[in-house]
Amino acid sequence: MSVDVLVLEWTTELTRDRLVSALISNYLSRYGISVQEGPLQNGRHIIDKVKPKVLLLVNTIGAVTSLEVAKYAKRKCVCVVSLFGEGNFNGDRIEQFVWGHNTQKQVVDHFRLVWSPRALQLLQKSYPELADTSYVAGSVGADNYVIGGGEYLIDQKIKECYQCVVGVGCWNFCLVDELDHRYYGFSEFVGHKEVARIRKDAVLFNGELKSLIKSCPEVLFLIKEHPHKANLKNASGVDDLEHFKNVIFTDKDESIMNCIKSSDIWLTYESTTSLEAWLEGKPTGLLNPTGTKFISNWRSPIYKGQPNFPDAASWKYAISEFIEKGRLPGFAEKCEIRLNLLDDVFGYSDGLNHVRVGNFIISILKGEIPYESSYERIRIKEYLTSKIKNMIWYSSAFIEMLGLWGRIPHFFHRFRVRAWNRKELFSYMDDLNSRQSKYYRKVKGSLDRINVVKVCRDE
């Protein structure tokens, strides 16, 4: 058995990465490209089984597992194409954005597609050796908001009990906790004074949000914690809020698109999800208790496109204005800034970034984009690792199906795999395919016309 393209993901749940890969898979399938979806945790075994020509990874540098799978595929002469889960590159943190968990800076892919010309320029400047194999494709995740879709998470009967829904997109305050493995890298970059300030903000953010929730019983708060938070105190700045009747915590794997769609206002401390909310047409605001000016230059300029309400009182007033007049104070005035930020971060906001990625992969399959490959013999250790992980995958999936994880010692939970439901995945992709078809007709009129859109290379 052999397929053209293998797409590996952690889960079939509609996470941010899944929303990206589904668009690309559907587009490729339209052109007769055979596409196989599979679990990243069992990646080596699937590569051996389906023998893909191209491996697509949505966030290669985001985890050690994805890096290992990329290396394995490359050694077996599979062309590896990498996207970036976080593409809003910052010059001072370019190493983290480009390499992530790849601490040895080993090139594990053949091509990498960044979000914007600015991101590509930063990459080329810092790592010229990657220049010839890096391209601009835009943010595929942004396409979902342009194409349309998503589901409302809140039952209509529940929503009718409230005058407004405020979504809270949490920042990962674990970065300033010494117990988190990312602390030392982050603190070295931003400095100890900034760490102390953010720690203070975490406590204040939590306290002001709690006061706001308490003072606004007519408002429902939908809280989406950061997907990579650790189980630490003040990890998201939302401790001790579960008992409030007007608070709903979403599932950790819940689609961010669904969370934003279900909200009337989007509140954050610092998050690229604000950009996604703008594409969805939702007003956003910050809760930065000690102000928006940070000491070091680590912060994304996204904060400039939205107002800051530093405490519960100012947020309460802003929400009241929104309920009464349908506008968030200070938001409309920053429209021009937001438009510039969307182009600067996402590259393109035309809903066709997945087409750019798809056409790039098609060009590889046609032999129009050459790449170097040489087979390397797989070591016995790697072969055995592949077989063991395959056994763990199927064993874990079987235990999941029987609902037995609660009876198994916590030590073994490290081998627990995330949800993988092919039926639900195919159902979602069928629905998405219908929306893609509708959008293609609306934007370009014919698929042939869309097919000429190429990945833009920054010269």
Image: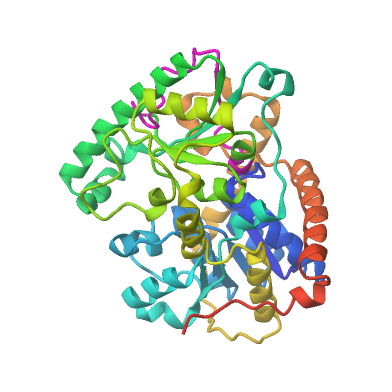
Q: Is residue 335 above or below residue 14?
A: below
Q: Is residue 250 above or below residue 256?
A: above
> Where is residue 106 drawn, in percent x and y?
38, 69
**Is residue 21 found left or right of 226 in the rendered image?**
right
Task: Specify whether residue 298 is painted magenta.
Answer: no
Q: Is residue 350 visible?
A: yes
> Where is residue 362 drawn, in percent x and y?
70, 76
**Is residue 133 found left or right of 201 in the rendered image?**
right
Q: Nearer the viewer, residue 328 or 340?
A: 328
- Magenta stretch prevailing secondary structure: loop
Q: Is residue 32 above or below residue 231?
A: below
The quadrant of the image that shows the N terminus is bottom right
Q: Is residue 272 above or below residue 137?
A: above
Q: Which residues are magenta?
A: 232-257
**Is residue 249 found left or right of 402 in the rendered image?**
left
> Where is residue 8 drawn, in percent x and y?
62, 56
**Is residue 15 found left or right of 183 in the rendered image?**
right
At 39% from the left and 34% from the top, the residue drawn is 230
At 63% from the left and 66% from the top, the residue drawn is 353
Task: Specify whether residue 245 is painted magenta.
Answer: yes
At 51% from the left and 46% from the top, the residue drawn is 332
Q: Residue furthest front?
A: 325
Q: Nearer the viewer, residue 407 or 274?
A: 274
At 32% from the left and 74% from the top, the residue drawn is 126
Q: Nearer the viewer, residue 380 or 346?
A: 346
